Image: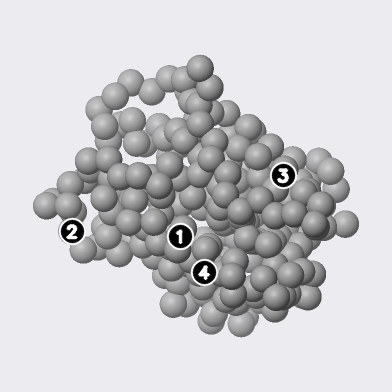
Amino acid sequence: MSVHLLTGAGSGIGAALADRLAERGDDLWLLARDAGRAAQLRERFPGAQTLVGDLADPSRLSWAFGHQSTPSRLDSLIHVAGIVELGTVAETPVATWQQQLNVNAVAPAELTRLLITALRISRGQVVFVNSGAGLRVSPEWGAYAASKFAVRAIADALREEERENGIRVTTVYPGRTATPMQEKVHQQEGADYDASRWIDPASVATTILAALDLPRDAELTELTVRPGA
């Protein structure tokens, strides 16, 4: 039975993936920002274990994990959680830059550092759910894209650094996906939101499962997923 630790399991892609993993009987560890959120996740995913840690404050994740039990082995660490705030470079304040960089890039790097031993024991896999904004930048997406370009760099470095330890590293670049984050983006863009136009989160979950289930003689390093016609 495989053991997985996910961030962002409360909604969207993370929830769809957690559902699929739970359905097939895998063990789940779910990261929550506080105790209340952890209780909600345990109610939604019976049998799952939770860790509490705030991705917005990555410098305190080590302290938080030091006061909790963490998995002794992990088959996968899956970074799904993220935030977005649109705005031009000329108008985006430092706090907005820092918040997105912390949650989207620094926290995944720190989580990986804290859990790397458990991943090495299992010769596991790290999956970074990035974004199309991690490949190209549009106006008003500078801060978010910067955080996602950073995630790409983290993943590429980690892949080479941990190859001899048997750890596989996959980056998934979903296009616009029908999630609460996408609805928020439409509000910021002043556009009508029609979920049927965008990728179903379950389709991205299927892509992630393909990477996780690939035989050990191969590695899916990067996967781009786009809305269908």
Which one is nearer the viewer's eye here, 23 or 219? 219
Question: Mark 3 or mark 1, which has the lower sequence index?
Answer: 1
Question: Mark 1 or mark 2, which has the lower sequence index?
Answer: 2
Local SS, label 4: helix
Question: Mark 1 or mark 4, which has the lower sequence index?
Answer: 1
Which residue is labeled 4 in the image? 157
Amino acid type, callout 2: Pro
Residue 165 - label: none
Which residue does the image show at 40% across and 54% down from the upper left?
Answer: 148
Measured as percent of width and height from the top left, residue 15 is found at: 62, 42
Local SS, label 1: helix
Residue 93 - label: 2
Local SS, label 2: loop
Which residue does the image show at 28% across and 54% down from the upper left?
Answer: 143
- Is residue 89 shown above or below 3? above
Front of the two marks 2 and 3: 3
Measured as percent of width and height from the top left, residue 7 is found at: 58, 56
How far is disc 1 from disc 4 in space, using C-alphas?
10 Å
Residue 209 - label: 3
Which one is nearer the viewer's eye here, 121 or 218? 218
Mark 3 neighbour density, 10 Å: few (under 14) some (14–19) many (20 or more): some
How far is disc 1 from disc 2 in space, using C-alphas?
21 Å
Amino acid type, callout 4: Ala
Residue 151 - label: 1
